[in-house]
Amino acid sequence: MSVDITHDFYNGWYLERSRGWALGLALENKLFEKQSAYQKITVYQTQTFGKLLLLDDIIMVTERDEFIYHEMMAHVPLNVHPNPERVLVIGGGDGGTIREIVKHPTVKEAVLVEIDIDVINTAREYFPTIGSEFDNPRVKVLAEDGVAYIRNNQNYFDVIMIDSSDPIGFAEGLFQADFYRDVYNALKPDGIMTNQTDSPLLSPMIVEKTYSEMQKVFQHLFMYQGYCLTYPGGYWTFGFASKRYHPLNDFDPKHAQAKGLKTKHYNTKLHNGAFYLPNFALATLPAGCEQKNWSE
């Protein structure tokens, strides 16, 4: 399972090509570049999308649209679980998912495990509105291998979020059943996992494989959708894998609204709608998934 992504810099533009699709961003200047122990990290100032973070020349985040991804990753599971106190993020070194997690008053401990300390340091310096909560007293930041960390912390977390890049290189292990089994064991008996699961429009085989691997481990498996303009195709999906809770039947909009969360994208009506999928997305879910029957 892999993704073929190429890139180019031409006449002041960054171009990313993937799966027969291309995205271009007009650049103003390069702000930072470093080869870390794991990848090349680059920051550009763009003309219309604020600062742009590239890892190995692949888009990770822009200041203009990052909130959509991070809000959907975080608020969906945290508003389904009735009392999330301990939350883990694997990856997510830009800090955006952590920023959203600590908006929830029940969260007592939010652990970020990012393998590349240089990504965290880059976010601190160049993306202060995204990596704004690294020093929150409820947040613990660890520069470690997330796979190893999961194995050593069983039955501890209420919610685990896999905020990873695409299944390329060292991130490929985060999309396999063995890893999901470790996540399952690290969750409490009513725990929830969310993860980014790519584009069912441009990468249906990758999405099918990801959900088939999750289904080997989790009893309750759902897909929900979001829109990330600077990710391939703009249409993106997330996995909701749970030991107990249903993302709609166990979701209380009034309870969520009472938290007074300040969001730019997520709201309780959008929460419900995000789980009602177009047919091409439903087609990528494995047999036995409850959602495949919702459109009937």
Image (cartoon, grey):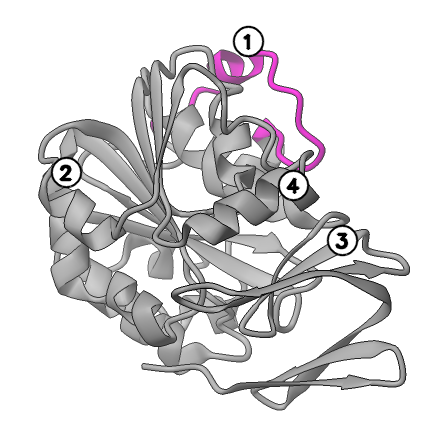
Looking at the picture, how far across and down is residue 100, in whole percent? 54, 30
| Disc 1 and disc 2 in contact, CB within 8 angstroms | no
Could you say whether the residue bearing mark 2 is in a helix, strand or loop? helix
Q: Is residue 27 left or right of residue 289?
A: right
Residue bearing mark 2? 186
Q: Earlier in the sequence, mark 3 or mark 1?
A: 3
Q: Write down the residue under mark 3.
A: 51
Vertical placement of residue 17 versus 118, above or below: below
Secondary structure of the residue carrying numbered label 1: helix
Q: Amino acid at mark 2?
A: Ala
Residue type of the residue flagged with mark 4: Glu
- Eye-nearest disc, 3 or 1: 3
Residue 219 seen: no
Q: Residue at x 50, y 18 (%)?
A: 256
The span from disc 2 to disc 3 (Cα, nearest Å) is: 35 Å
Picture disc at residue 258: 1
How many numbered marks have been drawn onto this rendered protein structure?
A: 4
Q: Quadrant of the N terminus?
A: bottom left
Q: Mark 4 and mark 3 in contact (Cβ < 8 Å)?
A: no
Amino acid at dot 1: Ala
- Considering the numbered disc 4 on the image, is that residue within a helix, a strand or a loop? helix
